[in-house]
């Protein structure tokens, strides 16, 4: 177990990111997704991460189904809101206005059939709305009991400080992996200064560090990796070479590449909780094996040699999506 922030909830050291069960990674099997969520809970995972725009509410309904007959208070649900999409799934921007906060939350609680969410956060900072207004609206819902804790997502240092001054922020959700280490220079130190935890997504870099990716893999319709710079032809070959080097270290530990990559994130501090995006029970079981890995200083040095900081080829999102990242548009 780990604590989100200095005053946040106790959560499992690994969390389950549920996005891929509904959206953005191509088709998923609904029955297998529900079984995977239940297997995660049975294995001791307590934190489930979702967004109201994952499958336009489908992901929240999936979680509701998976939680039937279980103790709601034994599970923490983290929800992102604010992303605007049309029927075809096109991205239309973000809405952080107070009325949007309250409306989005009301719909989320209806879909989850719950009276509260454990952590609520805007998916991307809305540049048209002062962060103080967005956080203030969530804080109102904390007072009403509909939200237990306030989080942030992909926020830069100035935004983190401003938000935290309005209401204590328990965690920043942000991409962090061996291939995405930008937070180390400024964002992570500020989080630690303020007592803000980190829930790290993309710990396997969307499959690049899974050990299961093949350079000839054809992506299904709707899989956003088709436009991800790190999966373009030249970049993909470079990044898979890094994975192969990491695989040699994993072999020496009797572990898989995925387990080593997750264990590396776990080893960066007790204030960091990796989100694993397993959509199937076999992938979940593999990810859980990371908890059994104890990385020595020599292991960490070998991992660093295999995948040096800044060695990834390609940005972590396409240019249009990068423009929405407050974490990238403001100094680290």
Image (cartoon, helix red, strand yellow):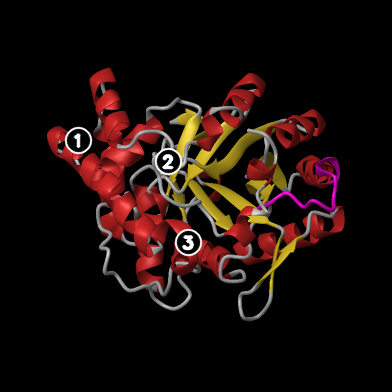
On screen, residue 307 above or below 208: above
Residue 97 position in % (x across, y down): 84, 55
Alpha-carbon neighbours of circle 2 within 10 Å: few (<14), some, or many (≥20)?
many
Which residues are the magenta region?
A: 123-133
Cα separation between marks 2 and 1? 16 Å
Residue 37 forms part of the magenta stretch: no
Pointer 2 or 1: first along the chain? 2
Residue at 86 percent of width and 58 percent of height = 99
> Toward which corner of the image does residue 248 lie, by quadrant?
top left
Cα separation between marks 3 and 1? 27 Å
Residue 231 relative to residue 198: left or right: left
Residue 255 position in % (x across, y down): 19, 40
Residue at 62 percent of width and 80 percent of height = 88
Residue 137 relative to residue 216: left or right: right
Cα separation between marks 3 and 2? 16 Å
Q: Residue beneath label 2, please?
A: 177
Between 132 and 244, the residue placed more toward the observer is 244
Q: Quadrant of the N terminus?
A: top left
SS of the residue under disc 2: loop
Alpha-carbon neighbours of circle 3 within 10 Å: few (<14), some, or many (≥20)?
some
SS of the residue under disc 1: helix
* Magenta stretch prevailing secondary structure: loop
Q: Residue beneath label 1, please?
A: 249
Q: Residue beneath label 3, please?
A: 228
């Amino acid at each position: 177990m780990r604590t989100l922030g200095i005053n946040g909830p106790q959560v499992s050291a690994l969390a389950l990111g549920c996005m891929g069960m509904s959206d953005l990674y191509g088709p998923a099997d609904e029955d297998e997704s529900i079984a995977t969520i239940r297997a995660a809970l049975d294995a001791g995972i307590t934190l489930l991460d979702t967004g109201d725009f994952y499958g336009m509410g489908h992901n929240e309904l999936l979680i509701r189904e998976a939680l039937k007959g279980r103790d709601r208070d034994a599970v923490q649900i983290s929800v992102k809101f604010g992303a605007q999409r049309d029927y075809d799934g096109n991205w239309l921007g973000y809405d952080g206005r107070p009325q949007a906060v309250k409306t989005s939350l009301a719909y989320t609680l209806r879909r989850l059939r719950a009276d509260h969410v454990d952590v609520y956060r805007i998916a991307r900072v809305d540049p048209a709305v002062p962060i103080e207004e967005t956080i203030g609206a969530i804080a109102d819902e904390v007072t009403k009991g509909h939200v237990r804790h306030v989080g942030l997502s992909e926020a830069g240092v100035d935004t983190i400080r401003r938000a935290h001054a309005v209401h204590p922020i328990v965690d920043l959700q942000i991409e962090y992996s061996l291939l995405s280490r930008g937070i180390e220079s400024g964002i992570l130190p500020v989080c630690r200064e303020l007592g803000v935890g980190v829930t790290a997504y993309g710990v396997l870099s969307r499959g690049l560090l899974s050990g299961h990716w093949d350079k000839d893999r054809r992506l299904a319709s709707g899989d956003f990796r088709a436009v991800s710079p790190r999966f373009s032809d030249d970049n993909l070959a470079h990044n898979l070479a890094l994975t192969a080097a990491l695989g040699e270290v994993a072999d020496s530990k009797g572990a898989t590449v995925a387990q080593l990559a997750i264990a590396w994130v776990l080893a960066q501090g007790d204030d960091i909780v990796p989100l694993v995006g397993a959509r199937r029970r076999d992938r979940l079981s593999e990810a859980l094996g990371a908890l059994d890995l104890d990385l020595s200083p020599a292991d960490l040095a070998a991992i660093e040699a295999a995948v040096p900081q800044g060695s990834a080829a390609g940005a972590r999102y396409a240019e249009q999506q990068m423009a929405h990242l407050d974490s990238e548009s403001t100094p680290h």
